[in-house]
Image (cartoon, coloured by chain):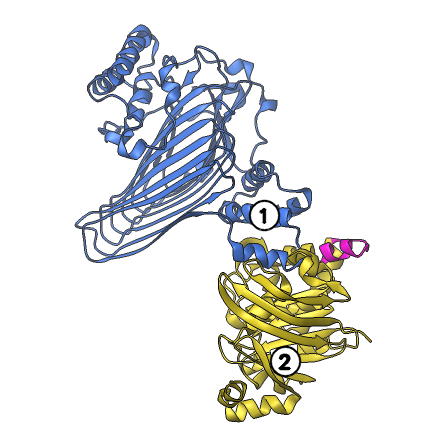
């Protein structure tokens, strides 16, 4: 079986500064991979490069997604092909209605797959169902994208989008940051509900906390733009106990 | 050059003075206006607050007002009526009974003989040549006067293309008025419209004023507004600038009594060779007064959009609260945006929050949309749309808001599937 996502020796720079220094990682369908590491280790860069954010220079390596060259696709093509980035800092867009964005995104994906678009009525039914699941207030429907949302509401909104778009590869960038324990449970519940043999998830996180609720199959530790250690869930627990110092030293 | 222009204005005035109605502006006041213009001239591009205005039409326009052609404009050419609003239509500055509800008594305000400040000299031109006046007075208990729409239609083109819309509004103590003021063109392209608006709000009076400028593509609009708000009065204005080749609005709002408040929400969208320029001065002249200026402008093509938001806090105005958010968006490599806050604060006890930015579309917003699979063209349109629609959404007359949103969508070339947002 070929991997859903295959990152091979990926090197990325921002301007002249190298940030990722040879990442190699494979994720199969059905797997959840946690990517952990201290601040500045390159975790978020990896998430953004996979989603196609401009401003990064890939200087070496390849990324293959469903057997295709992922880096050759634009950000919007990646999204339509089933790649989803959950933002660490979801962007506020005053004046753009939340539901409108969701529907436009949903229909863009359906068009891309040759499926008929859904109308507003049908779509609203879908959103209401998922909102209930995410325990979001009805008033959310009339609001602008993330505008005036609390940190927790923004993260719930990211997961709501994910539940509607049903990505094949979900990349969640520090989705746990800024969440209280109740919100974290709701978010984790949302992520777990999408776990299936068809999909893979990359969880980028600094802390082990979220992994109590979303149990990963693999844990990778990123230091200075390299994966210095991989293991199973017990590695995350060890990091929680001992901090990042020892892996950094082992890597040096 | 200026004196040549002023001399020409004086000559034209002398030729038509006999025919100008005394009941609108007295002959003495008209002559005084001409005298001041001869002494001081009109503003020119070298003047500090006029750097971005396009005043080129002044060189060739004939100032004498065009003869009213109201009978040539049919009701079908006007925008749909707005439910609950009495409409008064002025064609080339003159009341058009066939296109209007019952006319308000044309009684000019008694207190108008104020000397305009330097930036308000175009109001003198209106003083000199005004052919008619839309005078609206509301006193407490006159609920039937509470919603008024004034349409100023420019219909004259060619050599006699000047018109002088004149609007005088007085809201009595504790009374409230919703006023829609629209400047539109019907059947003409290049006209010269010089409007003057005078507003007086008595104690506890409240005015919500919607101003929409959608003149034709070669028109020039030069506009002067002077408002005074007494204690506990509240003036809310929504300005929408879409039309004309050259548009300039000059505002002066005085918060003259304690706790008086003004909110100016303005949006402008310009493309091709349009210039849309506004200078808005808020004077805090009494304690605990509140002002807010919100501006969003987009310039595309070779257009220029400028907004100069001036706030002056007088020594006695303790407890002033002033907020300003001015943002311009460049939608093309040859477009120009100039947003400028000007603050003059002469007391310590103030709260001011001011921000002014001019830039391109926000990269983070753009990437967020792309990361959800939205097409780049659509994402750009959506963000431009959102930039303006955020202000348009504050217009709480649904028919008016929809018509403005439609005009904005057309202007920004918003794709059909975005229009369902409207």
The tag on residue A34 is 2
Question: Mark 2, residues whose alpha carbon is within 10 Å: few (<14), some, or many (≥20)?
Answer: many
- Please give the name of the residue rendered at 54% of the width and 88% of the height, measured from the top-left corner: A247
Of labels 2 and 1, the one closer to you: 2
Up-down: is B336 above or below B115? below
- Residue A118 seen anywhere in this rendered image of the structure: no
Q: Chain of mark 1?
A: B
Give the colour chain B carries in the figure: blue
Q: Residues within 10 Å of mark 1 (few under 14, many from 20)?
A: many
Region of the chain picked out in magenta, as a range:
A106-119
SS class, disc 1: helix
Q: Which quadrant would residue B15 be assigned to in this image?
A: top left
Q: Residue at x 21, y 55 (%)?
A: B318
Distance of label 2 from label 1 (alpha carbons):
34 Å
Chain A, chosen colour in render? yellow
How many marks the image carries: the answer is 2
x, y percent for residue A100: 64, 55
Of all chains, the one bearing label 2 is: A
* Residue B290 is a magenta residue: no
Q: Is residue A42 left or right of residue A82?
A: left
* Residue position for label 1: B380
Q: Is residue B5 visible?
A: yes
- Of the numbered discs in the image, which one, if any, rests on residue B413? none
From what the image shows, is residue B319 above or below residue A248?
Answer: above
Of B65 and A218, nearer the camera is A218
Left or right relative to B278: residue A195: right
> Looking at the figure, which quarter contains the N terminus of chain A?
bottom right
Magenta segment includes A107: yes
- Quadrant in the picture for residue B283: top left
């Amino acid at each position: 079986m070929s991997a859903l996502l295959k990152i091979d020796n990926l090197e990325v720079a921002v301007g002249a500064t190298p940030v990722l220094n040879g990442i190699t990682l494979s994720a199969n369908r059905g797997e959840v991979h946690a990517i952990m590491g201290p601040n500045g280790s390159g975790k978020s860069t990896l998430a953004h490069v996979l989603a196609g954010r401009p401003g990064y220079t890939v200087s070496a390596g390849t990324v293959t997604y469903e057997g295709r060259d992922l880096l050759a696709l634009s950000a919007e093509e990646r999204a339509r092909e089933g790649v989803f980035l959950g933002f660490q800092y979801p962007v506020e867009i005053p004046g753009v209605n939340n539901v409108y964005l969701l529907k436009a995104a949903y229909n863009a994906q359906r068009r891309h797959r040759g499926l008929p678009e859904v109308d507003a009525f049908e779509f609203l039914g879908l959103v209401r169902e998922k909102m209930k699941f995410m325990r979001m207030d009805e008033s959310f429907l009339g609001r602008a994208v993330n505008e005036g949302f609390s940190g927790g509401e923004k993260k719930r909104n990211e997961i709501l989008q994910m539940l509607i778009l049903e990505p094949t590869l979900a990349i969640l960038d520090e989705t746990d940051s800024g969440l209280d324990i109740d919100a974290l449970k709701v978010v984790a519940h949302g992520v777990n509900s999408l776990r299936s043999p068809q999909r893979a998830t990359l969880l980028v996180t600094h802390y082990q906390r979220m992994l109590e609720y979303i149990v990963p199959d693999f844990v990778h530790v990123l230091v200075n733009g390299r994966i210095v250690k991989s293991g199973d869930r017990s590695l995350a627990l060890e990091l929680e106990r001992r901090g990042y110092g020892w892996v950094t030293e082992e890597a040096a | 050059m200026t004196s040549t222009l002023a001399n020409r204005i004086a000559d034209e005035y002398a030729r038509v003075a006999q025919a100008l109605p005394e009941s609108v502006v007295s002959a003495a006041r008209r002559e005084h206006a001409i005298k001041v213009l001869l002494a001081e001239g009109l503003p020119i591009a070298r003047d500090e607050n006029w750097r971005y205005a396009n005043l080129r039409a002044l060189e060739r326009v004939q100032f004498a007002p065009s003869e009213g052609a109201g009978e040539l404009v049919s009701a079908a050419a006007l925008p749909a009526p707005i439910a609950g609003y009495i409409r008064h239509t002025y064609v080339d500055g003159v009341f058009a009974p066939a296109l209007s509800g019952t006319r308000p008594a044309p009684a000019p305000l008694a207190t108008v003989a104020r000397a305009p400040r330097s930036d308000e000299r175009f109001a003198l031109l209106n003083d000199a040549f005004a052919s008619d006046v839309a005078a609206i007075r509301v006193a407490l208990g006159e609920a039937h006067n509470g919603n008024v729409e004034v349409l100023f239609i420019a219909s004259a083109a060619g050599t006699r293309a000047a018109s002088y819309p004149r609007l005088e509004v007085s809201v009595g103590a504790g009374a409230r008025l919703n006023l829609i003021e629209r400047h539109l063109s019907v059947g003409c392209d290049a006209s010269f419209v010089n409007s003057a608006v005078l507003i007086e709000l008595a104690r506890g009076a409240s005015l919500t004023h919607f101003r929409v400028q959608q003149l034709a593509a070669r028109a020039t609009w030069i506009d002067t507004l002077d408002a005074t708000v007494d204690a506990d009065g509240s003036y809310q204005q929504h300005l929408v600038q879409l039309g004309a080749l050259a548009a300039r609005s000059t505002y002066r709002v005085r918060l003259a009594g304690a706790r008086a408040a003004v909110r100016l929400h303005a949006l402008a969208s310009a493309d091709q060779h349009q210039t849309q320029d506004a200078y808005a001065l808020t004077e805090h002249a009494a304690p605990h007064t509140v002002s807010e200026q919100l501006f969003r402008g987009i310039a595309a093509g070779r257009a220029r959009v400028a907004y100069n938001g001036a706030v002056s806090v007088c020594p006695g105005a303790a407890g002033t609260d002033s907020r300003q958010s001015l943002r311009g968006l460049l939608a093309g490599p040859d477009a120009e945006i100039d947003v400028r806050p000007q603050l003059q604060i002469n007391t310590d006890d103030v709260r001011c929050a001011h921000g002014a930015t001019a830039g391109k579309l926000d990269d983070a917003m753009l990437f967020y949309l792309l990361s959800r699979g939205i097409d780049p063209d659509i994402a750009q349109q959506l963000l431009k749309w959102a930039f303006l629609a955020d202000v348009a959404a504050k217009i709480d007359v649904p028919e008016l808001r929809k018509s403005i949103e439609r005009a904005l969508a057309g202007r920004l070339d918003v794709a059909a599937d975005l229009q369902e947002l409207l």
